[in-house]
């Protein structure tokens, strides 16, 4: 079975449940989809596997087929909640290893922070790249922001 195709353009919501003070994360995700989000990346690095799976299942239900569901770095959770794919760190699991575990029916994305990392990810066959850090953000403390020039450089160098 082939993975669901990537929408074009992609508007991806990267989750951080700590920012959802007035409503459950699944409710916020549903609102974001109503506003045009067509891919959700669950990026909740600080919770245990069982809770991450529960949260992923809640969000999967809230998405209800209206957007792609990607799990950040956890192939076990991605498989268990029947996500559309997995999002990997620049230095994360190699795609060939992931394919042996999950098969070919998962979308695979990779974060990239350099042109070299982007070219390496493209050559390994990932489905999409997520470039960053473009602007200063509290979600990546210690990273220097690369700015829009980094996006222009990537756009001219990768497919």
Image (cartoon, grey):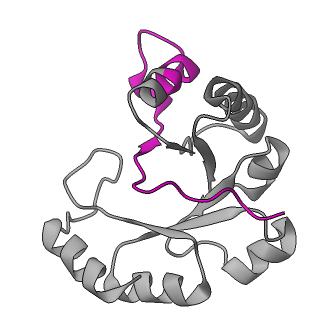
In the current view of this chain or complex, which residue is farthest to the top?
A: 22
The residue at the point 53 percent across, 45 percent down is: 43
Instruction: Return the x and y of residue 82 as percentages of the image width and height.
Output: 79, 45
Numbered-mark total = 0
Question: Hey, which quadrant is residue 18 in on the image?
Answer: top left
The residue at the point 28 percent across, 78 percent down is: 155
* Magenta stretch holds residue 7: yes
* Magenta stretch holds residue 36: no
Residue 37 in view in this figure = yes
| Viewer-side residue, 115 vs 144 | 115
The residue at the point 22 percent across, 82 percent down is: 153
The residue at the point 59 percent across, 72 percent down is: 92
Instruction: Return the x and y of residue 44 as percentages of the image width and height.
Output: 56, 41
Q: Is residue 153 above or below residue 41?
A: below
Instruction: Return the x and y of residue 14 as percentages of the image width and height.
Output: 45, 43
Stretch in magenta: 1-30
Residue 73 in view in this figure = no
């Amino acid at each position: 079975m082939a993975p669901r195709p990537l929408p074009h353009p992609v508007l991806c919501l990267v989750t951080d449940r700590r920012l959802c003070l007035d409503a459950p994360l699944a409710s916020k995700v549903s609102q974001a989809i109503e506003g045009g989000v067509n891919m959700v990346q669950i990026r909740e690095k600080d919770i245990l596997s069982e809770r991450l799976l529960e949260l992923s299942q809640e969000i999967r239900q809230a998405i209800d087929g209206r957007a792609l569901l990607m799990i950040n770095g956890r192939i076990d959770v991605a498989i268990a909640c029947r996500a559309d794919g997995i999002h990997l760190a620049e230095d994360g699991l190699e795609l060939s290893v992931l394919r042996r575990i999950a098969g070919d029916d998962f979308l695979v994305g990779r974060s990239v922070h350099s042109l070299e990392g982007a070219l390496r990810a493209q050559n390994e066959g990932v489905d999409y790249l997520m470039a960053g850090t473009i602007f200063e953000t509290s979600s990546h403390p210690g990273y220097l922001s690369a700015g829009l020039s980094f996006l222009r450089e990537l756009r001219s160098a990768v497919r």
